[in-house]
Image (cartoon, rainbow, N blue to C red):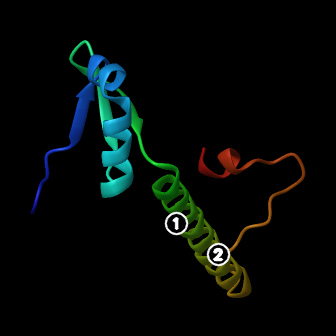
Amino acid sequence: MITTIPFMATVADLQRGYRALVEKIKETGEPLIVVSNGKPDVVVVDAKTYNIKARRLQELEEEYLLRIYKEAMDEHKKGKTIKLKKGQTLLDLIS
């Protein structure tokens, strides 16, 4: 397994060298972890990288939901589902 050292800066570094840090973020596409009092405080990414990752996450969520839907429909067609009675909840089935 390859591990890389994350790109980190303190709040003071960010205040003093904002433009240079932002340029590095844009150039590399890597996130910047801003550390405050020795602990990670926020993560900064450029807008392009954020949008790409947000779009990919949405695609993965949609793929997952579609797969689960198809699986549920297949089970329903095979008669593997249980119809709840009026007022019954899913928790009633497991208790």
Q: Residue 44: in sight, yes or no?
A: yes
Q: In this view, does 40 lie above or below 22?
A: above
Q: Can you say which quadrant of the picture contains the C terminus?
A: top right
Q: Residue 66 carries which label?
A: 2
Left or right: 27 as drawn, with respect to 92 = left
Q: Say which label, 1 or 2, has the lower sequence index.
A: 1
Q: Residue 59's quadrant in the figure? A: bottom right
Q: Give the camera-side residue of 86 and 39.
A: 39
Disc 2 crowd, CA 10 A, few/some/many (<14, 14-19, 20+): few
Dot 2: what SS? helix
Disc 1 crowd, CA 10 A, few/some/many (<14, 14-19, 20+): few
On the image, the x and y values in percent for residue 87 come to 87, 45
Q: Give the camera-side residue of 19 and 92.
A: 19
Left or right: 35 as drawn, with respect to 74 = left
On the image, the x and y values in percent for residue 24 come to 30, 47
On the image, the x and y values in percent for residue 74 come to 66, 85
Q: What residue type is labelled 1?
A: Arg
Q: Is residue 6 above or below residue 16?
A: below
Q: Can you say which quadrant of the picture contains the N terminus?
A: bottom left
Report the residue that reaches farthest toward the top: 37
Q: Residue 29: in sight, yes or no?
A: no
Q: Image point 51% across, 63% down: which residue?
A: 52
Of circles 1 and 2, the one toward us is 1
Q: Image point 52% across, 50% down: which residue?
A: 47
**Residue bearing the label numbered 1:** 56
Q: Image point 46% across, 57% down: which residue?
A: 49
Left or right: 63 as drawn, with respect to 19 = right
Q: Which amino acid does label 2 sit on?
A: Leu
Dot 1: what SS? helix
